[in-house]
Image (spheres, coloured by chain):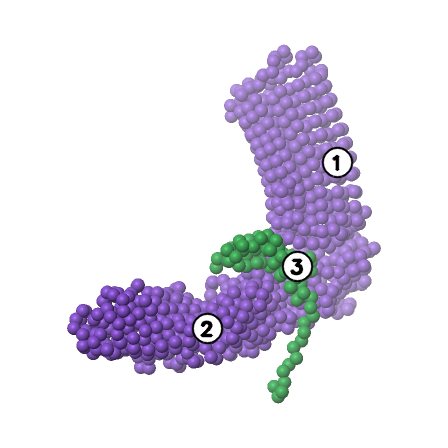
Chain colours: A purple, B green
């Protein structure tokens, strides 16, 4: 091995002996370097080298050299480096092939200089099959595309990208059947931007070991039909592909058993041609959002086979995947990023691993089928939509090892066929709702457990398995007038059992036959004017359920419901953590009914309903999404919202109890109006705004409570004999100003309040208590007109405690009067001292 | 519903659209810089478009494939 130096900064041919010296700057005339010699370019100056180049190692460390070469062979036995210094090479152009090879490890460093070749750059030669290691990112450019063997090709040995990018304006090939290692490092990648004469952009052959994080970008922007040829590789060896542009027809993963890791078509506007073979993707799958992208009709099964603990993400970008899919990676985790829709004739088989619907809609084709393995379906509020009108539309054929996970919210399996279909439950527990969302009869098999059973359309039918129990938490199956829901069993005369442990299960407008309702819950089928008791039913009551009314706004920041009840009935409207209005419920009930409108952590409006007759309606908005639809009974819309205003207004006409509760509400909590003979409770727990102004016209009890409220807690106006509490515990704002016209007891209590505690006005024959426990500001003004008992108490209060204005029969002629509190008495109130000017006292806590 | 950030740096504008039984739970998934270029009207239109296409798909009866006779 000899060293050869380009002796002078002059133009010349590689083969010209007059260009070379044996030492740097030495005498020329030595032989040109061969593949046993090192070639050095270390002279300052600008010059051009031409001809066919051959060297064992080569470096350019000075000057500005233009290489305008032909056929070039670099490397050989024990070659270690090929280095183009940064800023030292103006261009490197080869009219033919350029190869690099070593038997050990050769570092190829180009420092931003593209290797421009009209044909190809090859790594490794026959018998010289070491490792080419990139020392910098490498670009292989040039307009020509070599035949059908790659513009960049790994012929022998291994290529280590060493974390750098290899960019090729043509295809990349591994050509020989020998063993290769393609090492990417943590950030390495191969980008190909053109295809060969066969339309191939990337092709693998042989036995290949892939290491690192392998990413291949296919950025071919043309429209020529393109192939990417892979191999059957293990999960660890498989390569990720990004198809970033172009409008071509792509043949990819269409040889049996060929595999890829993650596959992304983001930016690709062509067609992934239909596949006929079984293939596996181990990583993410991203379909393209580009309008022209499509997936061809495929009969080959695409297996999502990740076994990694890393969650793999499936993104459809609203494109239909028209092919069968099997999820089968032991312990693998797949999650939908958006809605995913399969071709209507394609099956989804779930064998192993977890599929997280992630709150999205998964629309399968012919079936969702389980197969032998350990598999889990997680909903997180998502929907598995099974549209097929078949006996296997949902087919839990292998229930062993099958689990479902509710996650956040309540998911749904929707059986949507307009004709008969079957839910094969396999006796599993389904932590979701099963909904018959199509007019066709839904036959259920297996002794299953559900979060709930419901229906999204009317009319429709349920056929439950005879002599078998469906256990459920929620039952919301109902029809409409003229659109009944038919409930039967699989064998006429042999009942099917529905079991709910507690609470109420209410239906309406149903036709029941051979149904046993059990488990401890109260089962109501609706009145016989609506529903039909055909035969063979037990456990059902053919009335509507009882009704209750309450309005609750917990942490609500807006209106929570406006129920209006016309008769004796309870109604519940609850808004927890809501930020918009929770429901408007109008109930005109002729007999017992139950109406619940609940918005717990709701994100939208929680609905309104109009109920005109004895019935049952339950709107539950716990963590439910928007668009919560029409209630099962009655008309109107029930959706969920984040309330931002007041919590509830209740108008009760007669004989009813009203509860308005604002827990952590940030706005006012309710203003119930009780017309007669009712009890009204308005409660604001940790509310930050005014808590209620109940108006009780006659013969009622009214309670206004503000616990830890930061603003005023209620004003109570009671017109007639009644009993009023206005309580502000730990409130930061004013606690109540009750006005009692007649015959009332009126306690106003501000415990540890930071704000003003109450004014009480008792017109006649009343007892008034104004109590400030640990309050930090003033406690109350009490006004008693006549025949009243007035107590002002400031327990540990740090602000002044009260004024008492007595307008009659206490001490005549002395008005107003007020009192001074002795701070040494921890729990006392003072006698009224006549003829004092207004005084108050500072209380030490 | 709302915007969530995926582990790969993309954002997902999650939404639910439609009425029972045709409610679609979906998301617009894209890079943040792409999303920021969109107006609220464009975003709303994209969501509606996705729903319309999905609705059309799921309400269209499936077309059974005709098996190909290998013998031609």
Q: CA distance from mark 2 to mark 1?
A: 79 Å
Query: Is residue A566 in view from this perspective?
Result: yes
Image mark for residue B23 = 3
Residue A715 % position (x, y): 67, 31
Crowding near pointer 3: few (<14 within 10 Å), some, many (20+)? some
Query: Is residue A368 in view from this perspective?
Result: no
The residue sitting at 62% across, 20% down in the picture is: A803
Residue A30 % position (x, y): 18, 77
In the rendered image, which quarter is residue A554 located in? top right
**Dot 2: element:** loop
Residue that carries the numbered disc 2 in the rendered image: A194
In the image as oriented, which residue stretches furthest toward the left? A27
The chain holding disc 1 is: A
The chain holding disc 2 is: A
Residue A3 % position (x, y): 20, 73
Q: Are marks 2 and 1 in contact (CB under 8 Å)?
A: no
């Amino acid at each position: 091995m000899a060293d050869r130096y380009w002796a002078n900064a002059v133009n010349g041919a590689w083969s010209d002996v007059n260009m070379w010296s044996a030492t740097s700057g030495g005498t020329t005339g030595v032989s040109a370097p061969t593949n046993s010699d090192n070639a050095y370019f270390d002279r300052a100056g600008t010059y051009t080298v031409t001809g066919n180049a051959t060297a064992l190692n080569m470096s350019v460390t000075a000057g500005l050299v233009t290489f305008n070469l032909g056929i070039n062979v670099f490397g050989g036995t024990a070659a270690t480096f090929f280095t183009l210094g940064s800023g030292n090479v103006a261009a490197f152009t080869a009219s033919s092939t350029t190869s690099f090879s070593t038997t050990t490890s050769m570092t190829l460093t180009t420092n931003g200089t593209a290797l421009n070749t009209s044909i190809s750059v090859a790594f490794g030669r026959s018998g010289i099959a070491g490792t080419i290691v990139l020392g910098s990112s490498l670009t292989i450019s040039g307009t020509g595309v070599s035949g059908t063997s790659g513009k960049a090709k790994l012929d022998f040995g291994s290529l280590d990208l060493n974390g750098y990018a290899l960019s090729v304006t043509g295809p990349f090939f591994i050509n020989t059947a020998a063993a290769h290692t393609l090492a990417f490092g943590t950030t390495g990648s191969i980008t190909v931007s053109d295809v060969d004469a066969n339309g191939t952009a990337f092709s693998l052959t042989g036995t290949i070991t892939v290491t690192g994080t392998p990413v291949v970008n296919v950025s071919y922007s043309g429209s020529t039909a393109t192939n990417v040829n892979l191999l059957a590789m293990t999960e660890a060896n498989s390569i990720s592909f990004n198809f970033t542009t172009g409008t071509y027809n792509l043949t990819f993963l269409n040889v049996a058993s060929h595999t890829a890791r993650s596959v992304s078509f983001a930016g690709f506007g062509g067609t992934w041609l239909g596949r006929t073979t079984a293939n596996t993707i181990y990583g993410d799958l991203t379909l393209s959002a580009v309008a022209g992208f499509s997936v061809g009709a495929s009969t080959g099964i695409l297996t999502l086979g990740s076994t990694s603990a890393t969650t793999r993400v499936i993104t459809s970008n609203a494109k239909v995947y028209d092919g069968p899919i099997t999820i089968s990676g032991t312990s693998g985790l797949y999650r939908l990023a958006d809605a995913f829709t399969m071709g209507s004739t394609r099956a989804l088989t779930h064998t192993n691993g977890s599929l997280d619907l992630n709150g999205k809609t998964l629309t399968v084709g012919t079936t969702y089928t389980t197969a032998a393995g350990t598999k889990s379906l997680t909903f997180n509020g998502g929907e598995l939509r099974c549209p097929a009108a078949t006996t296997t539309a949902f087919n839990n054929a292998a229930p062993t090892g099958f689990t479902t996970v509710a996650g956040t919210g309540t998911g749904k399996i929707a059986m949507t066929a307009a004709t008969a279909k079957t839910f094969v439950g396999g006796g599993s527990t389904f932590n979701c709702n099963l909904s018959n969302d199509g007019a066709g009869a839904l036959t259920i098999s297996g002794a299953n457990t559900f979060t709930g059973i419901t229906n999204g359309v009317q009319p429709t039918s349920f056929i439950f398995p005879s002599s078998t129990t469906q256990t459920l938490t929620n039952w919301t199956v109902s029809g409409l007038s003229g659109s009944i829901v038919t409930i039967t069993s699989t064998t006429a005369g042999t009942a099917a059992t529905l079991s709910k442990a507690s609470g109420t299960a209410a239906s309406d407008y149903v036709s029941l036959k051979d149904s046993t309702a059990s488990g401890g819950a109260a089962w109501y089928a609706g009145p016989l004017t609506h529903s039909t008791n055909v035969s063979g039913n037990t456990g059902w009551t053919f009335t509507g359920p009882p009704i209750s009314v309450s309005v609750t706004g917990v942490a609500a920041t807006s209106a929570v419901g406006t129920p209006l009840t016309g008769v004796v009935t309870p109604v519940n409207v609850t808004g927890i953590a809501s930020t918009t209005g929770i429901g408007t419920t109008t109930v005109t009930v002729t007999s017992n009914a139950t109406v619940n409108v609940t918005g717990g952590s709701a994100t939208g409006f929680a609905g309104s309903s109009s109920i005109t007759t004895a019935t049952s309606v339950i709107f539950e908005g716990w963590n439910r999404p928007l668009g919560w639809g029409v209630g099962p009974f009655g008309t109107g819309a029930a959706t969920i919202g984040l309330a931002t205003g007041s919590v509830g207004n209740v108008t009760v006409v007669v004989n009813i109890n009203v509860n308005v509760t604002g827990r952590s509400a940030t706005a006012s909590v309710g203003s119930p109006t009780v017309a007669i003979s009712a009890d009204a409770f308005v409660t604001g727990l940790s509310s930050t705004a005014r808590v209620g102004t109940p108006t009780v016209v006659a013969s009622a009890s009214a309670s206004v409570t503000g616990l830890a409220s930061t603003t005023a807690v209620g004003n109570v106006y009671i017109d007639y004999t009644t009993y009023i509490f206005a309580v502000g515990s730990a409130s930061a704002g004013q606690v109540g100003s009750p006005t009692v016209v007649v015959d009332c007891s009126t306690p106003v209590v501000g415990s540890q309040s930071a704000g003003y505690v109450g004014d009480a006005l008792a017109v006649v024959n009343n007892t008034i208590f104004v109590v400030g426990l640990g309050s930090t500001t003033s406690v109350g003004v009490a006004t008693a007109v006549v025949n009243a008992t007035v107590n002002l108490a400031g327990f540990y209060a740090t602000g002044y405690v009260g004024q008492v204005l007595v307008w009659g029969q206490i001490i005549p002629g002395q008005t107003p009067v007020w009192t001074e509190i002795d701070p040494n008495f921890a729990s006392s109130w003072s006698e009224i001292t006549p003829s004092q000017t207004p005084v108050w006292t500072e209380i030490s806590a | 519903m709302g915007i969530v950030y995926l582990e790969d740096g993309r954002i997902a504008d999650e939404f639910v659209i439609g009425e029972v039984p045709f409610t679609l739970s979906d998301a617009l998934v894209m890079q943040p810089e792409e999303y920021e270029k969109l107006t609220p009207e464009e975003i709303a239109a994209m969501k509606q478009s996705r729903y319309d296409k999905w609705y059309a798909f799921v309400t269209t009866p499936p077309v059974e494939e005709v098996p190909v006779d290998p013998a031609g």
